Image (cartoon, rainbow, N blue to C red):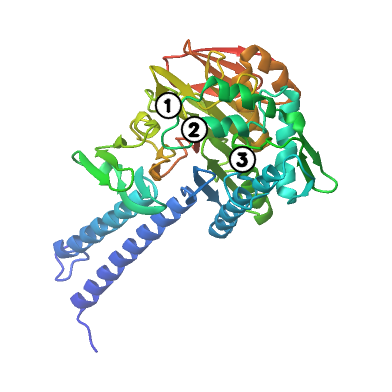
Amino acid sequence: MKLSLSSAKKWTVIAAALTILLVAILASQLLFSQTSAGYEATSWAMGSYVQQTLYGGEEEDTATKASSAITELENLISWRVADSDTEKLNSAAGTDWLELDERTINVLEQALSVAETTDGAYDPTILPISALWNFDSDEPTLPEQEEITSLLPYVGYEFLRINTEENTASLRKHGNGVDLGGIGKGAACDTALEIYQESGIDGGIIAVGGSVGVYGSKPDGSAWRISVRDPEGKAEDGLGVISLQEGCVSTSGSYEKTFSQDGVTYHHLLDAKTGYPAESGLVSVTVVHESGAVSDALATACFVLGIEDSLPVLKEFGASALFIDEEHHITIAGELEFEQISTSYTVSRQSL
Amino acid sequence: MSSRFPLFRKRDLLVFVLAAVLAGAGFLSWMPQNGAPTAVIEQNGEEVRRITLSSITQPETLVLEGEISVTILLEPGQVSILHSDCPDQICVHTGALTRPGQSAVCLPARVAVRIVGEISSGIDGMTG
């Protein structure tokens, strides 16, 4: 085939144009893959929305593994799940020691450690009282004072005994019961972070409800930025941002699960000493610790204890915290990188 | 350049312009999926809607029917849970979401709204 000079030139121009098009598309793909938003996976577990964002490596496979491992953990430690370790332990209360899964023993041990250090401000044996209030039901109601008084003697972390060598545990009295709701979400973060580490991905972040865990690094190498929600929901960008290189952060807030009766609002953070919602002048506590389980349990404990009594506890665990009180004041205790965004709160720092 | 076959004719220039426009369009159509803030709406773990916030030109409500019904308001540049039949109303109080990393969740209804997209200037997660 013989092309005229003008026809040959036409094809050259078209070829050149197509090349430019191709290069532009490839360049845009390359540009955006380098600053990619990461692989995202969401699911529901532990009565919460679970969000994972993973970077670099076998992201999808890792997210799936982490999600299954969290569901397995839930099926071991949730007292609501039939045949879970916790349900078996509660059913056997007052009888014999039970051999349990190592993962359950691990969570129980962390729960007991926080309970002992906080003298029961966080107490995993709160079930008789928490089941009575039943904040997870559709229509929780205020229990009778007599019911609370009659059940309080069955709450006490000293009733829970654990043998970590034999992976066994027991509850001393019939009527005792374990509720790991205050530590489960944090423990779920720990589970995911272990899987991220094993799978060799570059970085990942997991959020199980208000507990967040971070592992490794993001593509740009910057610190992970965790937004702290405004308890009043007014500041759409949140109160501010906590920067984390590693570890976990958990929040306990009195706004999370509530109901109102006769003009009084009741929240779910129960004081195991009184059997009623804790009144410490706080609206929420956010705790940062290397362990998700510990950060979760400490957030509850610190809410019950109030700022002053929390300080020695935070020091003992090497944790840091952000307290929000009813006076719109934020107290930051310990080493915590916090960038304030909302200006409707005042901020002060407290060393440990 | 009065040759019978000049190096470039107007028609050739047109082809180049066309290619450049196509490349630009390809670039732009690719970008929103990866960079621009995009609202992802899920119910019972299923994605029901995914929309680039900048592409919303007028307010629109999306009603997710269920045991607990939830109404979502899509507005230019933002999305919020407008109404929920749930008892705690945490999702409604979360307010408007505008930036990647933000989310509003209605646990009782198992409805989640989150913003995905390029997060280098935003946040990676939320607590509280």
Q: Nearer the viewer, residue A160 or B100?
A: A160
User: Where A140 falls versus A201 (above or below)?
Assistant: above
Circles 3 and 2 on the same subunit: yes
To which residue does mark 2 refer?
Answer: A135
For mark 1, give the secondary structure.
Answer: strand
Residue B73 x/y as whole percent: 26, 38
For mark 3, give the secondary structure.
Answer: helix
Picture quadrant where residue A290 is located: top right
| CB contact under 8 Å: marks 3 and 2 | no
The N terminus of chain A - image quarter: bottom left
Residue A184: mark: 3
Residue A240 x/y as whole percent: 48, 24
Circles 2 and 1 on the same subunit: yes
| CB contact under 8 Å: marks 2 and 1 | yes
Q: Amino acid at mark 2?
A: Phe
Picture quadrant where residue A79 is located: top right
For mark 2, give the secondary structure.
Answer: loop
Chain under callout 2: A
Q: Amino acid at mark 1?
A: Phe
Chain under callout 3: A
Residue A236: mark: none
The C terminus of chain A - image quarter: top right
Give the residue furthest to the bottom. A1
